[in-house]
Amino acid sequence: MMAAKTTARAMGLSTFLKSLFSLYLFLTLFSKSSVECFNLDDQFEEELLIKPLNNDFVYAYFQFTTTWDVPFEAKSFQNCHLFPRVLGEVLGQYSVQELHLSLTQGLWRHEKYGYPVVDAPAGTEIWAWFKEGTKDVNKSWKMLTSALSGLFCASLNFVEPHNTLSPTLSFAPTGAVPPGVHSNSSLLRYSTLPREVVCTENLTPWKKLLPCDSKRGLATLLNAGHIYNTNYHSLGIHVRPICKDISCESTAVELKQTVSLVYDMLQVGSLSRDWSFRKLFGQGLSGPCPLASSSRVYVDTTQNGSIFEFQLRPEPKAVLKSIRGGATSKIAMYDLKTMHLVSLLNIAATYTGEKLEHVNISPVLYANRYIIGYGQENGGIVTKVINNHWQPLDIVYMENIPWFLPVYLHTFQAEVNGRQLVPHAINFVPGRERERPYQLEVALRIPARSTTTLSITFDYIFLKWQEYPPDANHGFYVGAAVITSSLPVARNYTGVPHDGSTLLTRSVLIHCLRQIFLNQDKSFENSIIRFCRND
Amino acid sequence: MFGRGNCASGMAEVEDLPTMKSKKEKVEMKKAEKEELEEENARMLAAVAFAVVLICIGLPLWWKTTQVYRVALPYEKIASLRAQEEQGLSLKLTLLTIEEARGTQLCADFDTVFRISKLFRISCTNRALNPSEKAVIGGVQNLAELDRLDIIPVEIGNILLVEVPGMLRLTQNQIVLGSKRALFFSSETGAKKLAMVLNEWLLREETITHTLKAMRAPTLAGKSKEARTRVPPTVGSLDILLSLAVPSPEEIKVDWDITAAIEDYLHPFLKEMSSISNFSVKSQVTYFATLGVRKKAVNTIELGPHYAIQEELLPQIISPLEKKIGSHVSTSASLCLVLYIPGCTEAPLHFYTKKGQVVPTNAIISARWGGLVVLNPPKHACKNDDEPAEMRVQTLKVMGLFLAQLRQLLGIPELDPIPSAEMLPLMEAEPRLWEIDSLMRTRALEQVTSATLTLQSLSKLLGQIGNIVIGDEVGRSIFVATEHAHRAEALLSQGHLKEGFDVARVAFLESESAFTDPSLLALLYFPDDQKYAVYIPLFLPVMIPVLMSLKTIKNWIFKKLGKSKRD
C-alpha cells in the first residue's frame, strides 16, 4: 500500500495532445497582460583574491556574492532566480534574519598569516539571528540546523541545546537591522562543532548553490583534488539583509559564499615559491560565469618589492590602491568580463630576487591558547592576548566551554606583567550538565604593547559510557574562544577592494581571533585520554 | 537440621543420668523444645513473609512494570468499516423539462438504467420549466450565454438537466455539457443517450470502481491509464515547483516573468482546486542543467534538421534536473513543471512517440513526477555568437501546456468524445465545476477506502504482534480515523459530497499518521527468548528457594492445623 511507484512513465498521448491543443487555443482568449519586460532584480558577482603571505604561503580567497532586491522574508524566497531556492526556503521557513556558517579544516595562524577576509575556527561554526517575533527560537534553531545538515551533508544535526550559546557582547548582526534588535541576544544562537571535518561531500552541495554551479566561472577552479591539499581550508555561507541604498529605508538580501585556502607552496609543487593557477587549482580558467555581473581576480601586491619580489604573468590591466584604516594596499586586478581569453587563463607569479628569511610583521592583535594543569581537578585554560599597538585596545573575549568541563568564575584572572587587570564587564552563564555549555564573556581594555594572560580553571565531569566520542585517541574537542575588537589600524588586514555589496561603509572593523585547542595540542589530548582511562 | 540432631543425641545421654538431676533436665528439655518450636515458627513465618512479598507484591509489580503499554483499540468498529461500494453514493438529478410528463418519463427511465449501478444511488426529481425560465432560455444567443445562466442553484455533487427549447439554433449536437453543473439537452434526446453522457462523462462509475479495485488488490487489477496518471491519494498537501531550465545562458538570455505567469494562470486554477488539496507554488531558474540523454540528429521535411528524443526516455531525461528540485523543508508531495530551453548546440529539439511520430506540443508528462515542456529558441537566436540572444517566452502558450498537464496530473482526465454530445470549451484556467465534483467524488472514495484498508491492516498487525507499544497519540489517531471513516461513509451515502470529502480526508490523514508513527517500531523487535535471557539469571536464584520453601510452609501449616485439632 505504501509503495508508491515513482518510476516515471510516459503516457498515451493521443487524447492528451488533442487536449493540449484545444486548451491553449482557447487560452488565447484570456491572455493576461503582464508586465512586458520583466526586470531581474538580482545580481551575482564572483571574485578571487590571491595574497602571497610570508614564509612561502599563498592565501586564495573566493567570494561569490548574490544580492537580491527583495525583502528578507519567506514569501520572497518562493520565486527564485539566481538566489538558491533550497537555501531560501530554509531561511524563510525558520524566520532567519541572518545566517553564518563555516566549515573549516586547519588553523588560521594569525601571527604568521595576518588577518583573513572572513575568520573561521576549525570545525563547523554556525550562528544565526532570528527575526523579532519568532515564536520558539530554540525550536527554529534546531529545525534550521537539521535542514542545513541535510543541505550541506554536514553533521549540523548535532547542534543541540547543550552546545548552543546566546552571546550578549559578541556576534552583533553584520547586516542591516531594524533598530533595537541587536540588543536582544535571545534571538541569537551560536554553536560550534569543533570535531566536524569538511570534505568534498560538503563542497559539492555548496557549489550547487551557485548559479553557474561548477560549470563556468571561478568555481571551476575549486577542484576537490587540489583545494583539499592545503594547510587551511574553509567553506562559508553568509546570508544577511543589507541596505538597498544609503538611506536604508528598504533592505535587500545578500548571500556570500566564500572559500579560503592557504597553500604552503613548498609542499604543493616543485619546491619553489612560484605559484600559478595550474599549480594551485590544477587547471586554468576558461572564462567568467556568464550570469555574473562582474567577475574579477585580484592579486595583492602590497608586499611585492619590500619583503619579496615577484613578476605577474599575464600583466594585470590595472593596479588598484586600496586605503583602509591608514594602511594602503596595492592590488593588481584582472577583469574577466573584459578580457578576451584565447586559451585558458593561467595567472602566474614568478619570484625574483633574494629570499628573505624570517621576516614577519605580526598583526596588531592576536592570541595564543593552551592548556595547563594535570589530573582531574587541576585543569586550566590560558589564553595570551598580544597587543602590538601603541595604544590600549578594547576587546571582548568569549569562551565557549562544553558542559563536561565545568569552569569556575572565581578562578578567572586577567594578568598583564604580573598586574591584575580589572574587566569592564563580565557576563557569565554557568553551564548545566548535559543541558547547556559554560558561556563567559569578558570586556577588557588591554594596555599598549603588552601580553595579557587570561586564565580560568576547570574540572572534569564523569561521563556516561555513551557520551565518549568515537576515536578516543582524538581526545575531546573544545570550541574556539572568540576575541572581538575594533582595530584602529588595518595592518595585515586582508579584504577584497570592491567589497561585493556592502553599501554602507563600516566604521568598525570587527575581527575575531579564534583558536581551537585540544586537537592541536597533543599534551592536552593526552591528559584527556588519561581522564578517560582513569574512569 | 543440625541443631535438632545435636539435641537428640543430648537427650539420649540425659536418660542415663540420676533421677535427681533428670527432673531438672526434663524442665530444661521442655524449655529447649519450646524454644525450638518458637524458632521454627519464626523461621516459617519469615519464609511465609518472603513468599508473600515475592508472590503478592513482587510478581504483580513485575507484571505491571514490564507490561507493554497498549491503548485499547476499537477493533470491532474497524472491522465493521465496509467497502464504500456497498454503502453507495447518493446523487440528486434535477430535471427541468418543457412538459412535466416528459420529465417524469425520463426520471423513470433513469431509475431503471441506474438501478443496476453498484456505486451510485440516483434520485431524480423533475418539474416543468416555468414561463419566465422558458423566456430566459429562449432568449440566449449562443452556448456560452446559455452556460452562464443560473437557472436554479445546484448543490455540490448534484446535477441539473435542462431541456432547451429550440436547441438546434445554438448547436448541431443534442447534448451540451456546461462548465457549471448543468447539462443541456434538446427535445429530441432520448433517455438512453442522456444516461450515457451522465455515466461516461460525469459519474464515470467504471473508472472509479476500477481504481478502488486496484487499491484493494494492486497486483490483481491491471492499471488503467487514468490510474497511472493520477496523483496517489497519499497527499495531504502538494507543492508545485515551476522550473525554468536554461542549459546555456551564454547563448540565450531568456526573458520570462515567472512570478506573473504563476499569478495569472496557476493561482486561479489552484484556487478552485483548493477544496481538494492544499497547494503551494514555488519557482526557480536553473542554469547549466542539461537533459541527461543523447539526442539523435534527424532531418525531416516538415521540421528540417533537428534533434530527436524518444518519449519513453523521460525518466533519464529528467534525472539531471532532479538535482535541483528537492526541498529540505517541505514534507508534502511535489509535482514539477519544467520549461526547458535547449541551447544552440541541441536546438531545435523534438520529442517522438513510440510509434515514431513527432509530439507536436513538445510537451511530455510523467505520472506523479510532473511535466516537461521544451521550447525551442528561434532560429535567429543562434546566429549571433558574441552576445547572448534575447528570447521572450510566450507565457500564454507555455502556461496553457502546463495547465493541461497539471489537470491530468491532479486527476482531471481527458474524456472520450460521445457522438452528438459536446462539452463547452474551457474559457478560463479554472476547471469546470462538475470536473471538481467528479474529482472530489473519486478522491473521497479513494480516501475512505485507503483509510479503511490502512486501519484494517493496522488493527490486524497490532492484534497479531503483542509487544508493539500503542501510544496515546497512535490510539487517538486510530480512534479519530475510525470515527471519521464511519461518518464519511454515512455522509457520502446521504449525498453530502463536500462534507463527506472533508471528513474522509481527516480519516485518511489520521490513519496514515497512525500507520507511519515511529513509536510503533520502537519495541517491535524484542523477542521473548531475549526476555528470558534477561529475567532468568536475575530472578531464578531468588525464586528457587522461595518456591522450595512453599512446600515446607505447607507441611508446617498442616502440622499446626493437625496439632490444634488434636488439642
Image: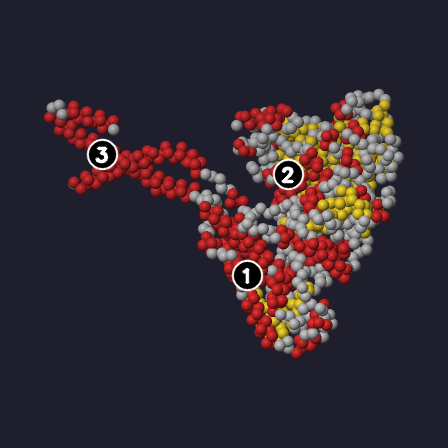
The residue pinned by badge 3 equals B37
* Subunit ID for the residue under disc 2: A
* Depth order, front residue of B114/A454: B114
Q: Is residue A178 left or right of residue A523?
A: right
Report, in whole angstroms, how far the alpha carbon at label 3 lies from the one at label 1.
86 Å
Identify the element where label 1 is drawn.
loop
Q: Amino acid at mark 3?
A: Leu
Image location (x, y in percent) of residue A199: 68, 33
Residue located at (48% from left, 45% from top): B469
Chain bearing tag 1 is: B
Residue B119's tag is 1
* Mark toward the viewer: 3 or 1: 1
Residue sitting at x 64%, y 35%: A193
Closer to the camera: disc 2 or disc 3? 2
Q: Amino acid at mark 1?
A: Leu
Q: Which residue is mark 2?
A: A156
Q: Give the image quarter of residue A446.
A: top right
Neighbor class of circle 1 (other Cα within 10 Å; few <14, some 14-19, many 20+) is many
Residue B382 spot, x, y in % from top left: 84, 45
The answer as to whether the residues below labels 2 and 3 share one chain is: no
Q: Nearer the viewer, residue B253 or B409?
A: B409
Q: Are marks 2 and 3 in contact (CB under 8 Å)?
A: no
Percent coordinates x, y for residue A517 in the rendering: 65, 29
User: Which chain is home to disc 3?
Assistant: B
- Mark nearest the camera among 1 and 2 is 1
Q: Residue at x 20, y 30 (%)?
A: B32
Q: Residues within 10 Å of mark 2 (few under 14, many from 20)?
A: many
